[in-house]
Image (cartoon, helix red, strand yellow):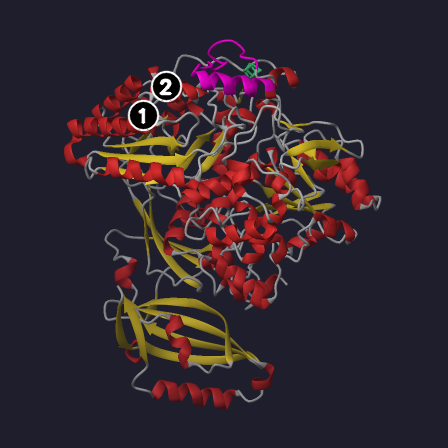
Amino acid sequence: MHKMHKYRLRYAKYGPARFASHLDLGRALGRSLRRSGLQVAYSQGFHPLPKMAFGPPLPVGVESEAEFVDITFTGELADEEISRRLNAVLPTGLVVTGVLKLPPKTPSLMSLIDRFTYIFFFVISPEDAGEWDKEKTAAFLAALWQKEELPVVRKKQGRERRVNLRPFWYDYNFSFIEQGLLQVVVDVAYGPQGTLRPDELLPFFPSGWRLQKVVRGQAWSGGEPVLPVAVHRGRLRSIERNGQGIFD
Amino acid sequence: MYNAYEELFDRVKKPGRYTGGELNAVVKDWHKAKVRVALAFPDLYEVGLSHLGLRLLYYRINDQKEFLAERVYAPAEDMEAELRSADLPLFSLETRHSLAAFDLLGFSLQYELSYVNILNMMALAGIPLRRAERDGAGMGFPLVAGGGPGSFNPEPLADFFDFFLLGDGEDAILEILTIMAAGKEKGKSRAELKKDLQTVAGVYLPEFYRVEYLPSGAVAAVTPVNGAPPVVHKRVIPDLNRAYLPKKDLVPWLEIVHDRLALEIMRGCTRGCRFCQAGMVYRPVRERTGKLIEEHLAELLKNTGYEELSLTSLSSADHSEITELAGRLVACYTPEVSISLPSLRLDAFSPELAARLQGGKKSTLTVAPEAGTDRLRRVINKNLTEEEIIAMARTAFGGGWQRLKLYFMIGLPTEEQEDLDGLVTLARRVYEIGREFHGSRARVTVSVANFVPKAHTPFQWRPQAGIEEIREKQSFLRRRLAGAGRGLTFSWHEAELSFLEGVFARGDRRLSAVLAEAFRLGCRFDAWADKFRWDLWQAAFAATGLDPAFYTTRPRPREEVLPWSHLSAGVSPEFLWEENCRAEKGIPTPDCRDHYCTGCGVCTVFDLPFPPAKKAKAGGGKDA
Ligand code: SF4
C-alpha cells in the first residue's frame, strides 16, 4: 500500500463553470485529475472514484474565488507541481489558486468552515444611478441591517417553513466601482446553526439594482480565512460575464 | 451580442446546455475562417452531444485552418420562450453567432420525430424555412444540409433543405467546404454553387429531381433535371484504418445521455436482419484494427480523462478481434476506467467476458429475440432459436446475474396471434429460470417496440400495423404478462409515435407541407412521449389533405416507384425484394461474413473487398 498524502486545494469557479452543479464539478475534477497524470488515490470497489472531499456546495450560478477540496495522492508532491499540472488540464472556468499539504487528522472542510463572504455586483439603471449615491446606499443598507426579521419561506420536501435570515447575516460593506456599478459585500453564517443562500437576500435589495453576478469571495474558520490563501496572481477584475477568462 | 445571452442563462433550466465552454471545445477566430459551418442536432444538448458522428465532423472541420465549425442543439421549451421574448436569434455555443450568420447549417438526421425541431431551430434564427425563399434572398442565408440515416429518405424534408449527404461524411464534408470556399471567393450565386456541389459523390440536391405523382398518390416518376445523375449513390470510406479520427473529444459539464468516451471500432453490419435500416444502409462491414483502436483510445483517454470508454458499432461483438481487444483493454484500464459495449448482448458474448467488462458488478444483460417464435424470427432473419435463448438465460442467471432485458418487436410482417403467445411464453419461461436461481430478486424487463418499416430494407414494401392493432397487441401482452410476478416488467412505446415515425420514414415530398403545418401548430420534441401531440398532428394532416395511412398501413406493389428510388445505399432493390420474398417463406439468409457473399451488391457497386470473416465467436457465444 502506498503512503497517502492529503492536500487541500483552493480553486476559483467562474464563467461557464458557474452553472456546474456539485455533481458536475466532481465529475469535471475527477476527469481533470486523470488527465493531469497526478498519482491520485482511488476508492475501492467496482467503480473506483478519486478520493476527494469537497467543502460546502456553491449555489449553482454563483462564481467563487474561495472553493476548497481535499484530495488524497499516493505520493508526496510539491504544492507547485499540483497546481501547475492541474491548471494545465482544467476546463475553462476552474483554476487552482493555492495548495496546502495537510497534516494527519486535519478537520474536514465541512466541519471547519463557519462563515462565507459573498460579493453582489449590481448595475443601477442610468435613470436611478444619480439618485443612488453613497449616502443613500449607506442609509438603505444600515436600515436593512437594523431589522430584526428578514423572513423567507423555504421549501423542503414539499413542506414550507418560515425562516428568519437575520441571525445568519454577520456583516456587510459596500463600494461603488463607478457610478451605477455597486458592489455589496456580505458575510453569512455557515454550519449546523444555519446559513443563508445569496439569492435569498436578493428580494431585500431595491428592485432597481440589477444583479450582474454573485461571487463567493472568501471562506472563514474561527475568524481566519480558510487556508490555503490564493497565491495565484489571478484576481477577479472584470464584472462582465463574457465567459472568457476573467482572470489575469 | 455574446453577452446578451448571459441573462437568459440565469433563467433557464440546465444553462450548461447553452453556455458552451466544454473541455476540448474549439473556439476559432470568426473573421479568419473562409467557410463557417453550424453543426446542428435537432434534439436537446444531452442527446445531441452524445452523438458520435457530429463530434467527428466538428473536429474534422476545425482541424482545417480555413474552416470553422460550431455546434447548436435544439433549445428546450424554456429557452425557446426566453429567446422569443428577448427577440434574440438561436445561437451557436462557441461564439454565440446567430445560425443565420453561417455559410452552412448542417443537421444530423437521426430520427424522423425530430424533424419539426429542425424547422423550429431555423425559424428561431430567422432563416426562411423553404429553400425557394432562401434562394430568393441572394446569398443572405446559409445553405441548409442534412446527413445521417435520415438522408436515405429525406423526401419529407425536400422543400426545406438545399442538399443531403448520403453515407460517410468524413471526407465528403471537406470537399463540400472547399467548393463553398471557392464559390465564396468568386462570388458565385446559390444556383451556381449548388451546381458545383452536385459533383461531390454522395451529395443529393432535391431541387435537381422532379417528382410526379399518380392519381392514387403514389410516385409516378422521379426525373433528374439540370444534368443530375439518375441515381445518387451514398459516399463510402473504403478503409476505416485510414479514415480521419480526432485526437480529442468534447467533455461536457452536464451529464449527457452517453457520458463516456466512445470510439467507433467498426462500421456496417452484415447480419442481415430484415427490419434493420442501419444494417442495410451502412454496409459493407469495415473494421479498425485492434492496434489502431488501442493506440487511439490511449490518446483520447489522456486528452479527456473519461472514466468510462465504449467501443461502438452496430454489433461490436462481431469485430474480428473483439475478444482479444476487450481482454487487453480490461487488463490495461480497469477498474479506474470501465469498459462498455453499447449493449451487452448475451447472444454474442460469453458471460465471462461480460463479467469482466462490467467490472464484476453483474448489472444487466440483454438478449434480443426480437420476435416471439422461431418461425417469426426466421422471417425477420434473426436466427436465434427458443432453445438458444433459454440456454442463454440459464447461463446468465446461473452465472450470477439477476437482471435480464429482453427486446422484442410487435407488428412484424406475417405476425399472428401465435407469435404473441410465443412472446408471452418465452418471457415467462425466462423469468421462471431467473426465479429458480434468484427467487424474488430476479428481474426480467420485457421491452416491446413497434415495428416501423424503413426505406432501403427488405420490408420497405410491407404495410405497417395501424394504431389500433398495436394498441390491441400491447394490451394483450400487458394482460398476459401482468400475472407472472413482480419481477417481470413490461415496457412499450406509444402506438401513435411509431405510426408517425412510419409516415416520415417512407414519406414523399408532399409531407413537407404537413411538417410546416405541425410546426405552425406548435409541435415540438415529438420523440418525447410527454411532448408528443397527436391531436395537433392529426390537425396538420387534415389541413394539408394528406392521409397518414397512405404512407403506412398500405402494402406497396413491387412496381411502385418508391419516393427514395433515386437514392442508393449500394444494396440493390433486387436483393431487397428477394429478401422480402424469402421472408414470406421463412427462409433465413446467412451473414456474408460467416459464409459467402449473398449478393447484396454493395461491395460490387463500390468496388470494395468483401468484408473480413468473423473469427470464432467471442467466448463461444452463438451467432444471432
Ligand atoms: S456484396 Fe456480398 S460480401 Fe459485400 S456486403 Fe453484400 S452480401 Fe456481403
Q: Is residue B413 left or right of residue B24?
A: left
Earlier residue among tags 2 and 1: 2
Closer to the camera in the image, B109 or A139: B109
Q: Position of residue A171 (x, y in %)?
A: 36, 79
Q: Residue furthest top?
A: B596
User: Which quadrant of the structure image shows residue B197?
Assistant: top right
What SS does tag 1 mark? helix
Identify residue for label 2. B375
Which chain does the numbered disc 1 sit on? B
Q: Position of residue B442 (x, y in %)?
A: 20, 33
> Is the residue A203 above or below the residue B284 in the image?
below
Disc 2 C-beta below 8 A from ligand 1: no
Secondary structure under badge 2?
A: helix
Q: CA distance from mark 2 to mark 1?
A: 10 Å
Circle 1 residue: B418
Badge 2 crowding class, 10 Å Cα cut-off, few under 14, some 14 to 19, many 20 or more, is: some
Q: Residue at x 56, y 23 (%)?
A: B283
Residue A22: x and y in percent read: 37, 55
Residue at the location (42% across, 25% down)? B414
Span highlighted in magenta in the image: B574-599
